[in-house]
Amino acid sequence: MNIDHVHFYVEDAAAWRDWFVNILGFRSIAEYSTLHTQTEIVRNGKIQFVLSSPLTDVSPVSQYLSLHPAGIADVAFQVADLEQAIAVAIAQGANLLQPIQTQQQPQGRLKWAYISGWGDLAHTLVERSGSTSLLPRHTELVQPVEPFIRLDLSHYLPPQPDALSNFIDIDHIVLNVAAGDLENAVRWYEKILGFSRQQTFAIRTERSGLCSQVLIHPQSGVKFPINEPASATSQIQEFLDVHRGSGVQHIALKTANIVQTIAFLRQRGLNFLPVPSTYYSQLRQRSGFCLTETEWQAIAQQQVLADWTEDAPQATLLQAFTQPIFAQPTFFFEIIERQTYCCAGRLAQAEGFGEGNFRALFEAIEREQIKRGSLT
């Protein structure tokens, strides 16, 4: 099971298409309108984002935005056998929002179904054979369908080699749930979608805290951490209050060169959570520090977090986090590089998550909470 696409519900899909293109370096690859909803599709590497906004009050996007601020309504997964996936989901108690649909296309076949996830998050499950469009072709299109069909071709275009913001794929997606819901949410994703537990974190400071369970899919390696607040002042609780319920907190975009990517994104005007200079002086004192002087200066200049384990210090995990992208302090992006190293004569990659970076992120968001006055 892999991440197929992520569907954002926003007030103005065209404006957000331009934002993804102009700021993050995505490509606009398709657009279409139904009677009630405008949809734009953007792509970078293997990452595909669908952006929808309402044209009328009866649009499902309008209904969603009456309950929540702009954010992610659907995380879609591609599966090898849709019938089996849905049968397992129903047997384990999943709420089927739309039964399996099949659409034969000129060069392939698209099958999909729609289940309710945790809270108001939904999950489209997709099975593809041959070459298909990202989404089903709608029968009630207002605009001509050709721009939408062009997705069949662009799906196979390689990333532009000169685009410095090229991303590889989605590394992980993080879900925030209410206090006391973490274990139930974890069990739901284990039973319904086949995830397994990988790591557990409990982060506490003098002001607040959170608990987190990292889930991973055993077949594909898709990572899906889930957080719950450990205090009433937790940044997770602030998200839940502003978002008016559980939801996706952030998506990590994987890159092969985080320093180059962050520099490019800053030049485009993307704002990141600041990291105090003391972090980098302390980093040099950590056991296992093996960054070269040039590497250390580069990550300090771009304010990138670095983490590793003492038994494999060369497996460095590099991360940076944007400010919230919407008007409210809810959803943000993470940029991540999992460095490759040689282990027993084979190339390996930094895996999992480092507690040092997790804590550094938590403290960085706390500083933003203090600026907003939501934490004292």
Image (cartoon, rainbow, N blue to C red):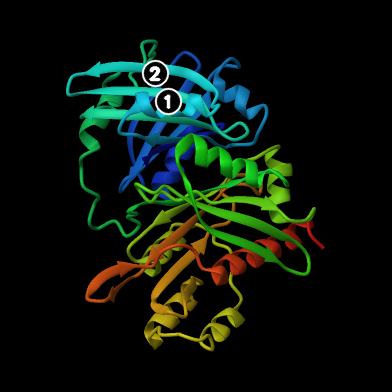
Label 2: few (<14), some (14–19) or many (≥20) C-alpha neighbours in 10 Å? some
Q: Is residue 135 visible?
A: no
Circle 2 is placed at which residue position? 100
Displayed quadrant of residue 57: top right
Image location of residue 285, percent across then percent down: 54, 89
Residue type, numbered disc 2:
Ile
Name the quadrant of the N terminus.
top left
Query: How far is disc 2 from disc 1 in space, using C-alphas?
Result: 8 Å
Q: Please, which residue is most extreme toward the right here?
A: 376
Rendered residue at 40%/77% (across/down): 312
Label 1: few (<14), some (14–19) or many (≥20) C-alpha neighbours in 10 Å? many
Query: Which one is closest to the eye, mark 2 or mark 1?
Result: 1
Image location of residue 47, percent across then percent down: 36, 45
Residue type, numbered disc 1:
Ile
Choose between 342 and 147: the one closer to the eye. 342
Element type at mark 1: helix
Q: Please, which residue is most extreme toward the left here?
A: 107
Q: Relative to 144, does residue 332 appear above or below in the rendering?
A: below
Choose between 295 and 81: the one closer to the eye. 81
Image location of residue 158, percent across then percent down: 21, 47
Rendered residue at 40%/85% (across/down): 290
Image location of residue 183, percent across then percent down: 64, 46
Q: Relative to 104, does residue 346 appear above or below in the rendering?
A: below
Element type at mark 2: strand
Circle 1 is placed at which residue position? 86
Mark 2 touches mark 1? (CB < 8 Å): yes
Label whose residue precedes the other's in the sequence (2 or 1): 1
